[in-house]
Image (cartoon, rainbow, N blue to C red):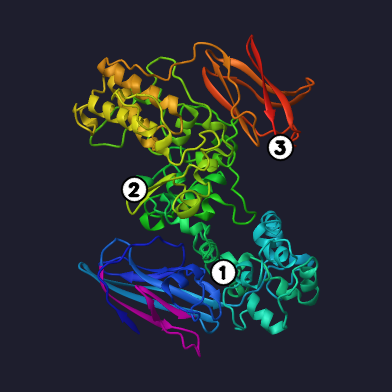
Amino acid sequence: MIKYFTHLFIPAFMLLFLLIGTTTAQNPYIEIVPMSSYKIDQFELGNEFFVSTGLQNVGKGEHIYVRAVDRDGADITDYTWEITSSPEGSEAELIHVIEDIYYFEADIFGEYTVNLSITTADGSGQIDRIFSANMYTGVGGFGGTDPNFQAGHCATCHGGMDAELINAWEQSRHATIFQRGIDGEVPGFGAFRQRTATTGVATEDLGSGSYFSLKAETGWEFPENLEPGNFDQLVEDHPELAQVATIGCESCHGAGSFHTDDTGNKNLMQVSYTSESCMSCHDATRPTAEFHSFRRSGHSNPVWSGSFQNRDRSNSLQDCVRCHDGRGYVNFTKDIGTNTDADVYTQDDLVFISCESCHDPHGGGLRSRPADSDTLASGLSYADIDLGMGATCADCHKYRRFGEDAVPNIAIRVPGPPWGPHYAGATDMLLGDGGYEFDTETPRSQAHKAIENTCVGCHMTTAEGDRRNLIGDHSWSMTTVVDDTQYDLVESCVTCHVGITSFSDLMGADYNMTGVVEPFVDEVQGLLDMLAEALPPLGEPTVSPGDIDNNDLEQKGAYWNYLFVRNDKSLGIHNPKYTIALLQRSITTITGVEFEHTPDVPQEFALRQNYPNPFNPTTQIEFTLPEQSDVVLEIYDITGRRVNTLMNDNLSTGTYTVSWDATNQSGQTVSSGVYIYRLQAGSFVETKRMVFIK
C-alpha cells in the first residue's frame, strides 16, 4: 500500500473506461496518465520507465501510470493507493514516480483492481478501477497474409464486419509506416523509430506478443540496409511478427487477447475519444511534435455548462455538444446525435476536442462531414467556396445566430441565456455574413477566404525559431505572450504583406479618429472601445446588456456588432473591411459621429496590376466590383491560348484578391514567360500582362 499527501490537485479529463466504486462525500476518480518519451526525458525518469499509451488494457509487462483526481475540483488533502486484487504470482505494486503520479507494472496476464481513497476538507471517498494485462494478437491479413482465427487476429472478425475501416486503415500512413521505413521510403527512418511505428510499447522480451517480444523470440534483426523488399522478406520469414510490425488496431484500442476470448464484452477493448494513445508517439522529443503545441490550445480545455444537457440530440448548430464535446463532434460527422439526457450525460462525460475529433483514426486525414453542414446561421451555404481543410474548422467556428433575425426577434434578458451571435464565429466573419448591416451595403474583404485551406493555411503554419510550438501547428494560435514577449505567426501573411515580422507591422488608416495611424489591430480595438463607450451605461469600457433597450433596434444592432467583432477574436484580420464597416456604422448610427477614413463600397469596376510582378511561385490579382456581377477571371499565354480559369462565379459588391500559382488547368506549372489575365464582370472587360520567371 502506498500513501502520499498533497494539498493541490488539478482536475483532469475523463476517459470512457470501466469504473467500479462508491463514494461518500466526494467524487474520486483514477486518471490514467499517458507517458511519452518526451515526458520521461522532461521528468528525468531514466530508462527503467516505459512509455505508456494511457489505455487500461495493456500488454503484459507494460507500465500503467495513475493520478488521483476529485471530479468536483476539491483540493485533496490525503489519499491512499492500493492494489486490492491481482493475478496469482504478480508482484505488482504502486510506486511513486514524480509529483502526484504513481505507476505499477502489469507483470502477469490477468486483471488488476486498483483502489483509491481520497480525503478533502468536505469528506472522503473511494473508488476502484480495473486494469488488465493482455497478449497482443496482431491485425491479421497484413502484408498479404491470411487472418488466423486461432491466433486471434483482429481481421478474422473485423475484416468482414468493418471491411471499410480495415481497408481504409491498410492504406493509411499508420499502417504502412514501418513497411515504408524498412523499405527505404521514409527519410531518416532508423532503428530508433521501431517503437513508434509498431504495436506495443515495451522494449524487452516479455512474451506479450508485441513487436519487440516477437522480434526477440524470432531472432529477426532490424535491417542494416533500408531498401525495397525488406518488408516482404519479413512477411515471408515471420508472418506473425509482420502483424505487429505496424501501428495496428491494438496500438489504439489496447492489447486484445481478453477481447478475443470474450468478444461480447466491449469493456475489454477501448474506444477512446481523447488523445492519450496518440500522445505516446506524437509527443516525442522533436521540435514539431504535435502535442507540444496542442497543450497550448483551447481545444484541450473543454468548457462545461449544464445547458449541454437535455438537448435534442440533433448535433445541429444549436446543440452545444456538437462543438463542446469531442464525442459529440465525431457523432456529428457520422450524422448521428449524442444522448445528453441529464441522467446519462454529466460533466464527467465531457470529452475535450482531441486528435480523434478531427482526424479519422483509421484512414488518416480529416473526418468526412455531412453534406449539409456547409451552412451559416443565416442560411448562407458556403459549399461552393473552397475552404479546403478549413471546412472542418468551420463546422464549429461559426455563430449560432444571424444578426438580421436575432436583433428584431430575440430579446436581451438579464439574467437569462447569453444574447448575441455566440462565440468564435470566425467563419461568419471570414465570409462577411451575419453582422447587423442597418439596411445598407457593407464592403467585404475577399483575400483571406481565398487562402489555400483557409483556417488551416494560417493557423496551422509552422513557426520558425523560438516561436516553434508556441504558436501555429496544433495550438492554432496566431499570437501568444511568453515572459512578456509577444510572438506572432506571420509566416502565411508575408506572401502578400511582404516584409512584416508581426501583426503590428500591418498598418491601416486612422479608422478610430485618434489623429494617429496605428497598427490595424489597434485601430480595430480602438473602434471596439469607442462602441462600448457609446452603449449603456455610456462612457464605460464594458457594456451593460441589461440597460439596452429591446425596442431600440439601432442600439441592439450596434451591440450585436460589438459582440460579432469582439467574439471573432481576430481583431479584424479575418475580414478587415467588414470589421471596420460594422463598427464604424454602429457608432455613427447611435452617436451621429461621422468617420473620415472608411472602407467604402467600390464605385467602379477595376482590375489592378498583379503583385508581385515578375513573380515566382505565386502572384495576387485584385479587382473591384461596384455591384453584384457574374465574374470570369482567366489566364492566357502570349499566343492567346487559355491557360487557366481562376474564377467563374457570381460575386457581390466588394474588392477581391485571387492567387495564381503559375499552373495550368491540369495543375502543371507553366513555362517562364509573359501571360495575360482577363477579367469579365458583366459588360466590363479588361486585361493586363504579367511575367512568370522560374
Nearest the eye: 99 or 124? 99
**Could you tell me residue 340's position as x and y percent?**
42, 49
First in sequence, mark 1 or 3: give its number: 1
Q: Residues within 10 Å of mark 2 (few under 14, many from 20)?
A: few
User: In the figure, residue 511 lies in which quadrant?
Assistant: top left
SS for tag 3?
loop
| CB-based contact (under 8 Å), mark 3 and mark 2 | no
Left or right: 401, with 650 as reference point = left
Task: Return the residue at label 1.
Answer: 254
Q: Residue at x 20, y 67 (%)?
A: 122
User: In the figure, residue 295 lies in which quadrant?
Assistant: bottom left
Left or right: 324, with 27 as reference point = right
Task: Return the residue at label 3.
Answer: 694
Decide if residue 581 is in sight here.
yes
- The label shown at residue 305 is 2
Decide if residue 434 is in sight here.
no
Residue segment shown in magenta: 76-105
Nearest the eye: 161 or 118? 118
Left or right: 137, with 330 as reference point = right
Three-letter residue code for mark 1: Gly
Per the model, the C-alpha gap separating discs 3 and 2 is 56 Å
Q: Looking at the picture, does residue 566 appear above or below residue 59? A: above
Q: Residue at x 52, y 17 (%)?
A: 653
Discs 1/3, front: 3
Q: Residues within 10 Å of mark 3 (few under 14, many from 20)?
A: few
SS for tag 2?
loop
Specify the quadrant that holds the N terminus. Answer: bottom left
Three-letter residue code for mark 2: Ser
Three-letter residue code for mark 3: Lys
